Image (cartoon, rainbow, N blue to C red):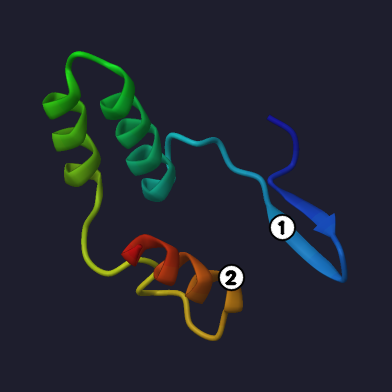
């Protein structure tokens, strides 16, 4: 993978592989649950990947707030 920190707009963005990021593991497992015969197993995997409130350690970020809101819908 190339450098994880890349210039974007007036600041920087982190480009990380999907697997180490819990929200991506959750979304991937949820997508599998929607499209496979193993839906309950995949839904269980999605729920197991989620621990605590979304982005609990990220403060002062409009992006994190949007993601927290998105997760409730």
Q: Residue at x 74, y 42 (%)?
A: 3
Q: Residue 39, position in %: x, y?
A: 18, 24
Kindly report the distance in space between the C-alpha atoms of the residues bearing marks 2 and 1. 11 Å
Query: How many C-alpha atoms fall within 10 Å of the one at disc 1: few (<14), some, or many (≥20)?
Result: few
Can you identify the residue that label 1 sits on?
Answer: 13
Q: Residue at x 37, y 38 (%)?
A: 25
Q: Kindly indicate the quadrant of the structure image that contains residue 27.
A: top left
Judge by depth and name the residue closer to the eye, 38 or 25: 38
Q: Is residue 11 left or right of residue 63?
A: right
Can you identify the residue that label 2 sits on?
Answer: 63
Q: Residue at x 39, y 74 (%)?
A: 57
Q: Residue 51, position in %: x, y?
A: 21, 58
Quarter placement of the N terminus: top right
- Marks 2, 1: nearer the viewer: 2
Can you say whether 5 is above or below 58 in the image?
A: above
Describe the element under mark 2 as helix, strand or loop.
Answer: helix
Q: Kindly indicate the quadrant of the structure image that contains residue 17.
A: top right
In the rendering, which numbered label is found on residue 2? none
Describe the element under mark 1 as helix, strand or loop.
Answer: strand
């Amino acid at each position: 993978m190339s450098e994880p920190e890349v210039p974007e707009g007036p600041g920087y963005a982190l480009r990380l592989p999907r697997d180490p990021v819990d929200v991506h593991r959750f979304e991937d497992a949820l997508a599998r649950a929607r499209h496979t015969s193993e839906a309950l197993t995949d839904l269980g995997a999605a729920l197991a990947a989620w621990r605590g409130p979304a982005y609990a350690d990220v403060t002062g970020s409009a992006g994190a707030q949007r993601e927290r809101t998105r997760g409730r819908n």
